[in-house]
């Protein structure tokens, strides 16, 4: 019996790791396929031969993405909303692939961002507070710092730092997938073991860290091949992140409806995404208590309230601190 249990755990762990590796590989392969398909549409230099109706094309694409996200919430299919959120993140990912792996064809996906690219309002830089780790490194890092027997310049340090966040995200995601598979095999109603003892949504946490690491890489000064346009991706990442968080909250609403007592108890014990002291949990849930007299949202209206509240709060704080958050990404 013990050997059988060990074998089952080994199979589950292997499947979880294989799933994560396969997903990561498919993501890169997806970028390569898009590159091959879109390469003929990517002229040289890219920014000098844009069609005159690029804003209209981008607006149509952006509206379709928004419709996909909203549709997922309306029909109670959070997978659709998650896909919409990832599509919104695609221009950032396209920049990463274009700069790191020379898959320049997917730069056509930047068309999604053109409606937000306004020199008057600078919409794409909204929420610049989220680049604070990069700002801190930019300000305090000394190029003469030596790690072991060699020194590392600032740009290389930020690159390694970003890849470190990406790796941590992938590890957490893998761990979450393994625990999820174990829960499915055990036919548990609520997964409250393994990594789920520390985070109610480890897969979403892993994705957010992975995507944030990629976002940080787009801030590193470098030129794209073939004259690709360099956008600010701040607003795109944090809007995508807010949507993923809303998806996670909506999943909790569905779970709470299905297992009201069990899931309510689980929510009290385990943090939403990142383990944190009760004092910080109390601060983050304060808006809900002030408006709805409860700690956590229980329907779509309350989730929308949190999405708008924290979205505007990030923009407001970023506006106040904007003089300190300006960096040169060109």
Image: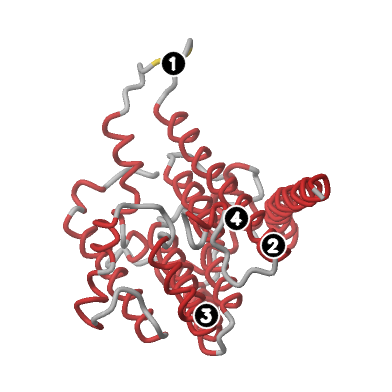
Q: Residues within 10 Å of mark 2 (few under 14, many from 20)?
A: some
Q: CA distance from mark 3 to mark 2?
A: 47 Å
- Residue 209 percent location from the top left of the image: 49, 51
Residue at mark 3: 259
**Which numbered disc, 2 or 1, marks the residue closer to the eye?**
1
Quadrant in the picture for residue 309: bottom left
Measure the C-alpha gap from mark 2 to mark 1: 40 Å
Locate residue 57: give its quadrant. bottom right
- Element type at marker 4? helix
- For the residues labelled 2 and 4, the Cα–Cα distance comes to 34 Å
Disc with the residue nearer the chain's start (2 vs 1)? 2
- Front-lying residue, 212 or 15: 15
Q: CA distance from mark 1 to mark 4?
A: 36 Å
Q: Which residue is mark 4?
A: 176
Residue carrying label 1:
151
The residue under the point 52% across, 62% down is 89
Farthest top residue in view: 149
Color theme of the render: secondary structure
Nearer to us: label 4 or label 3:
3
**Horizontal and vertical percent for residue 300?**
42, 85
First of labels 1, 3 by sequence position: 1
Q: For the residue carrying disc 3, how many other residues have a C-alpha within 10 Å: few (<14), some (14-19), or many (20+)?
A: few
Tell me the residue that label 2 is attached to.
38
Q: Identify the secondary structure beneath mark 1.
A: strand
């Amino acid at each position: 019996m013990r050997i059988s249990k060990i074998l089952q755990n080994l199979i589950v762990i292997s499947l979880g790791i294989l799933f994560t590796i396969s997903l990561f590989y498919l993501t890169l392969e997806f970028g390569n396929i898009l590159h091959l398909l879109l390469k003929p549409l990517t002229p040289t230099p890219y920014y000098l031969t844009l069609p005159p109706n690029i804003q209209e094309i981008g607006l149509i694409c952006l509206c379709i993405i928004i419709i996909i996200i909203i549709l997922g919430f309306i029909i109670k299919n959070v997978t659709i909303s998650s896909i919409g959120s990832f599509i919104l993140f695609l221009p950032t990912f396209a920049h990463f692939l274009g700069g790191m792996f020379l898959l320049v064809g997917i730069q056509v996906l930047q068309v999604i961002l053109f409606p937000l690219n306004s020199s008057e309002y600078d919409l794409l830089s909204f929420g610049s507070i989220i680049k604070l780790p990069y700002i801190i490194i930019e300000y305090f890092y000394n190029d003469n710092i030596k790690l072991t027997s060699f020194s590392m310049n600032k740009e290389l340090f930020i690159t390694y730092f970003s890849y470190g966040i990406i790796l941590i995200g992938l590890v957490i995601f893998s761990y979450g997938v393994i625990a999820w598979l174990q829960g499915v095999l055990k036919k548990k109603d609520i997964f409250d073991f393994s990594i789920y003892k520390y985070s109610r949504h480890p897969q979403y946490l892993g994705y957010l860290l992975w995507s944030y690491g990629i976002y940080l890489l787009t801030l590193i000064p470098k030129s794209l091949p073939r004259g690709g346009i360099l956008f600010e991706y701040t607003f795109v990442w944090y809007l995508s992140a807010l949507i993923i968080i809303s998806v996670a909250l909506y999943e909790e609403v569905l779970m709470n409806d299905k297992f009201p007592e069990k899931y309510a108890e689980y929510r009290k014990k385990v943090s939403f995404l990142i383990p944190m002291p009760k004092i910080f949990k109390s601060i983050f849930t304060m808006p809900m208590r002030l408006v709805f007299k409860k700690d956590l949202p229980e329907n779509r209206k309350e989730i929308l309230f949190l999405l708008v509240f924290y979205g505007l709060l990030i923009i407001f704080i970023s506006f106040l601190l904007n003089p300190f958050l300006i960096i040169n990404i060109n």
